[in-house]
Image (cartoon, helix red, strand yellow):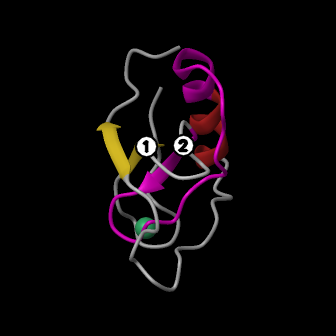
Amino acid sequence: MTLLPCPFCGGRARLRECLSGPEQGGRCIECSKCEASTVLLFASKIHVMPVLADKWNQRTPKPPPKKSKRQFEWEAYIDELDGVE
Ligand SMILES: [Zn+2]
């Protein structure tokens, strides 16, 4: 499974997980440059990754936020979805 580049800036996409706050445990695919992202999904990792990749690759992510400062702590824990079916 391959993640397409960001439709806004062409940046590299990656999976992120929210580690704190009300969205803790939510996962999305986000641009590493402009922070455009898919919706947050709350499910087990093995189920959520293909769904998020589909959403991202359909080229309908949310536009990047006006402020790049994040309210909550996030962790990017994978850069590639290769090998995930
Ligand atoms: Zn971008």
**Which quadrant would residue 60 be assigned to in this image?**
bottom right
Image coordinates of residue 48 in percent, x first then y, are 61, 27
On residue 68, the disc is none
Work out whether residue 40 or residue 58 is closer to the camera in this orientation and state it. Answer: 40
Question: How far is disc 2 from disc 1 in space, using C-alphas?
Answer: 5 Å
Direction from residue 16 to residue 24 in the image, left or right: right
Secondary structure beneath dot 1 equals loop
Q: Mark 1 points at which residue?
A: 19
Quadrant location of ligand 1?
bottom left
Q: Mark 2 points at which residue?
A: 24
Q: Give the range drawn in magenta.
A: 26-50
Image coordinates of residue 57 in percent, x first then y, are 59, 45
Residue furthest to the bottom:
66
Q: Which amino acid, by three-letter code, is at mark 1? A: Leu
Compared with residue 69, is residue 77 higher up or lower down, i.e. above or below? above
Work out whether residue 6 or residue 25 is closer to the camera in this orientation and state it. Answer: 25
Number of callouts in the render? 2
Q: Which residue is drawn at 34% across and 59% down?
A: 32
Q: Which amino acid, by three-letter code, is at mark 2? A: Gln
